[in-house]
Amino acid sequence: MTSLKLFLGFFLQFIFLLSVVNAQGLTVGFYSQTCPQAEAIVKNVTAQVMSVAPSLGAPLMRMHFHDCFVRGCDGSVLLNSSTNQAEKDAAPNLSLRGFQVIDRVKSALENACPGVVSCADILALVARDVVVALDGPSWEVETGRRDGSVSNITEALTNLLPPGSNITQLISGFQQKGLSVKDLVVLSGGHTVGTSHCSAFTNRLYNFTGNGDTDPSLDPNYIARLKIKCPQGDQNTLVEMDPGSFRTFDEDYFTLVNKRRGLFQSDAALLNNNETRAYVISQLSNSSSTFFTDFGVSMVNMGRVGVLTGTAGEIRKVCALVN
Ligand code: HEM
Ligand SMILES: *[C@@H]1O[C@H](CO)[C@@H](O)[C@H](O)[C@H]1NC(C)=O
Ligand SMILES: *[C@@H]1O[C@H](CO)[C@@H](O)[C@H](O)[C@H]1NC(C)=O
Ligand SMILES: *[C@@H]1O[C@H](CO)[C@@H](O)[C@H](O)[C@H]1NC(C)=O
Ligand SMILES: *[C@@H]1O[C@H](CO)[C@@H](O)[C@H](O)[C@H]1NC(C)=O
Ligand SMILES: *[C@@H]1O[C@H](CO)[C@@H](O)[C@H](O)[C@H]1NC(C)=O
Ligand SMILES: *[C@@H]1O[C@H](CO)[C@@H](O)[C@H](O)[C@H]1NC(C)=O
Ligand SMILES: *[C@@H]1O[C@H](CO)[C@@H](O)[C@H](O)[C@H]1NC(C)=O
Ligand SMILES: CC(=O)N[C@H]1CO[C@H](CO)[C@@H](O)[C@@H]1O
C-alpha cells in the first residue's frame, strides 16, 4: 500500500515536472530553491537603474535579442575579447549599452547566492523588468539557462539581421531560430521604444537606388522630417523610433508602420506579407490590441533559442569573462 502511494506520488510529480519544464529544460522559477530572492534582486537593481537612467531600458531589452540570435541565449553577447573579436565588437553593437547594469545585477546576485544565477538568465529577466518599467506588459520568464564560452564577431554579423532586410530575409532569419512569422511581427514591436543612429536608415532618405531618389515605401512627409534630423552623411545622430513616446512601451509602433512611418526597411517590410500585414492592421485599435499579451509570449519563445541547460555550459562569475 505504502509503496503504491509512493509510486503514485513519484508518478504525479513526474507528470507535474513534465508540464512545467519545457523541452529545452527551462522552467519558470528555476531558482526558487537555490536562490529564492534572485528575481526580486534583479527587479530591484533594474528598477533603481531605470529611475535614474530610463534611456537604458531600450538597449537592455535589445541586448537579450542580440544574445539569443547569436549562439542562442547563452550570455555570449556579454563576453569581452582581448583582441576585439567578440560579438560586442561587431558593427550592429553600436548602440548596445548598459553592460554595467548587467554587471551590477550580477554582483548583487553573487553576494546573495554565489555561482548560482547565469548571466544569460540575467539578460532575460532584465529584459522583462525594463519593459515593465517602461509601462509595458509583464510576463513569466523561464530560467535555467547556462552561460556559453564563445563569442565570435563573424557570427554576430551573419546572425543579426540588417535594417535593410526585406520580408523574405526577415521571415527566414527568424525561422532559422525556430521563431514564427507571428514572432517576427510581434517582436518587431520592440521598436516602440528606443533610438536609432541615422546610419541605420539614411539610405532611405538619399540616393535609395543610386538615382538620387528616396524610398517609395516611406511617407514623403516623414522623409522631409527625417532629413532635417539626419543631413546627408550624418551617421551618428540619434533619432527616436517612436517619436514622442520612445520611452513608453505602447502599441504605437503598429500605427507608425501602417502610416508608412516605420523607421527601417525591416519595419516597412511588415506590410509586404499577408500575415504580418494582417497583424499590423489588427493592432490599430486600442480596444482590440493583443500586442501586450503577444509580446510576452514571443519573448518567452525567443528566450528558448539555442539555450544551454543541465550540465552544459557554466555559471559565469563575471559576465564579461569565461570562468
Ligand atoms: C526584426 C529584425 C530587427 C532588425 C533588422 C532590427 C534593427 C535595429 C536597428 C538597426 C536598430 C538601431 C541601432 C542603432 O543604430 O542605434 C535597432 C534598435 C532597437 N531594436 Fe531592433 N531590430 C530587429 C528586431 C528587434 C527585436 C526582436 C527587438 C526586441 C524585442 C528589438 C529591439 C530594439 C530596441 C529596443 C532598439 C533601440 C535600442 C536603443 O535605444 O539603443 N529589435 N534595431
Ligand atoms: C532592494 O534595494 C534596496 C535598496 O538598495 C534594499 O534596501 C532592499 O533590501 C533590496 N531588496 C531586495 C529584495 O534585494
Ligand atoms: C570588458 O570590456 C569593457 C570595455 O572594453 C571594460 O569596460 C570592462 O572593464 C571589461 N570587463 C572585464 C571584466 O574585463
Ligand atoms: C568565428 O566564426 C566563423 C564563422 O563561423 C569561423 O569561421 C571562425 O573561425 C570563428 N572564429 C574563431 C576565433 O573561432
Ligand atoms: C529579398 O532580398 C533577397 C536578397 O537581396 C532577394 O534575392 C529577394 O528577391 C528579395 N525578396 C523580396 C521579396 O524583395
Ligand atoms: C548616388 O549613387 C550613385 C551610384 O552609386 C553615385 O554614382 C552617385 O554619385 C550618388 N549620388 C550622390 C549625391 O551621392
Ligand atoms: C495575400 O492576399 C491577397 C489578397 O488578399 C491574395 O490575393 C494573395 O493570394 C495572398 N497571398 C498569399 C501568399 O497568401
Ligand atoms: C490609443 O490610445 C492612445 C493613448 O491612450 C491614444 O493616443 C491613441 O489615439 C489611441 N488610438 C486609437 C486608435 O484609439
Ligand atoms: C561598445 C562597443 O563595443 N563598440 C564597438 C562596436 O564595434 C565596433 C567595430 O565594428 C568597435 O569599434 C566598437 O568599439
Image: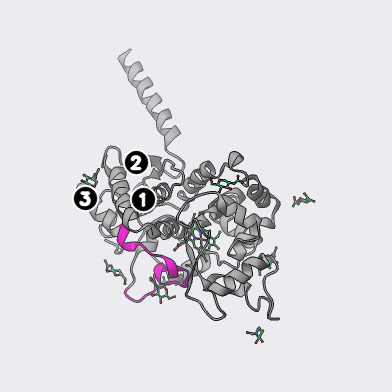
Using residue 286 as the reference point, say whether residue 55 is left or right of it.
Answer: left
Q: Residues within 10 Å of mark 3 (few under 14, many from 20)?
A: some
Question: x, y percentage for residue 94?
Answer: 44, 70
The residue tagged with tag 2: helix, strand or loop?
loop
Residue plotted at (54% across, 74% down):
230
> Is residue 240 among the parts visible in the rendering?
yes
Residue plotted at (50% across, 77% down):
235
Q: Quadrant of the N terminus?
A: top left
Front in this rendered view, residue 172 or 24: 172
Using residue 309 as the reference point, say whether residue 109 is left or right of it.
Answer: left
Choose the circle earlier in sequence order: 1 or 2.
2
Q: Is residue 200 magenta?
A: no
The stretch of residues the image draws in magenta is 82-102
Choose the circle earlier in sequence order: 1 or 3.
3
Label pair 1/2, CB-CB below 8 angstroms: yes
Using residue 84 as the reference point, say whether residue 105 is left or right of it.
Answer: left
Amino acid type for the residue under numbered disc 1: Asp
User: In the picture shown, does residue 48 fall above or below 233?
Assistant: above
Residue bearing the label numbered 2: 30
Q: How is the image coloured?
A: one colour
Residue bearing the label numbered 3: 114
The residues bearing labels 2 and 3 have C-alpha atoms spaced at a distance of 16 Å
Amino acid type for the residue under numbered disc 2: Phe
Q: Quadrant of the C terminus?
A: bottom left
The residue tagged with tag 3: helix, strand or loop?
loop
Image quadrant in which you'd find residue 200: bottom right
The residue lying furthest to the top in this view is 1
Q: Which mark is residue 121?
A: 1
